[in-house]
Amino acid sequence: MCLLTCSKRFRIACIENKQLNGKVGLKTLKDTYSEIELATTLSDFLSIDKNTSDGGDLRLYGFIDATGNNQAAPDFFRCAWDAEYFPLFLKTDKEPCFPRSPLLVMPEARHSDYLRTSGCRADGDITWFLSHLNLKQQVPFWQSLIYATSPFGERILHRFWDGFVIKNYLNVLSDSELKQLFAPVHTLFAPADNHWLSKDLSQCPASTPTNNHDAWWQIRSHHLTAFGRQFDQVQESDIQDQLWRQYPLQMGHVYPPLIPQIIQSGIKQAKDLGVRKEANMVRFIYLQLKELPTFWRQPLWLPIWSQKNTDIEFERRLMQVQQSQGGELTEGTAKG
């Protein structure tokens, strides 16, 4: 398949290189693209491949992150308002987040100006890919990835549509893992700090998209190595959010500028003691706030840190405290 350029000679070569089913694609794939190069490549791809609707041809799709405050979604709806798209949170338990939702979009040849002006900014809010499947066929698969299972067995939100998450996955996943995670994808274009990375998944071990169960994707410990501080910041933000939701009175007594430092320190201490589950880190930090930062040294708690499975022992001790004080671990029943 051929890399489409502005050159007429290469355009003709691409057209002559049609496969038996009439599809025209990318014959030569570069490892990296500038923003302008990718916009030109994808625009030319759309102008040659007419994106027929029979489900057999290779088409261009994109993920647009409309879950945060960025210009990606407004630019899309302003410049490609008539393009087909699907909000991936629709008909899931995340639907109440509307209008915040990742979008699966399908631009066509008439939207080339959108690709050239704003659709190929490598800022992490848009990811492009080619697929043989039509939009409707892909939706169940992508929705099955909204949640994943963490290395510690927890069901967590999985921002697979985030361009920088995809970029980091490219650095740590094997080809077979990439094909499993991005099963509908033929060719992937991921943003990476003002340029684009490409990955041809068509030659990876075959994996057929299916209606997988919820949170079927298992995040392994080695997957997190590429995320580094970015993952830590997401975890700290999530833990702070849970603390405010579960223990608002106690959080209200903390001097706000100190909260990030307290949470960072609490996470580190919990991990050093063997706590791995995020829910238990929330409880651990709450106990630090409620009692003392060194509560874990008290006779009630000290023996559990030397056990083989700290999370299980911590949960058992919490249950004992709850039973002795009559209720859940709330702002009034934390002290042991």
Image: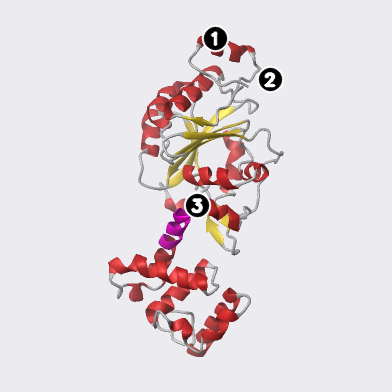
**Where is 168 relative to 244, above or below?**
above
Q: Secondary structure at mark 2?
A: loop
Magenta residues span 227-237
Residue occupying image coordinates x 43% and y 86%: 335
Numbered mark located on residue 9 in the image: 1
Q: CA distance from mark 3 to mark 1?
A: 42 Å
Q: Quadrant of residue 184?
A: top right
Q: Quadrant of residue 112?
A: top left
The answer to whether the residues at label 3 and label 1 have Cβ atoms under 8 Å apart is no
Q: Amino acid at mark 1?
A: Arg
- Taking 165 as reference, is 121 left or right? left
- Taking 217 as reference, is 121 left or right? left
Numbered mark located on residue 21 in the image: 2
Q: Amino acid at mark 3?
A: Phe
> Overall secondary structure of the magenta stretch?
helix
- In the image, 193 versus 143, the foreground residue is 193
Residue 135, how many percent across, how many down?
57, 35
Q: Amino acid at mark 2?
A: Asn
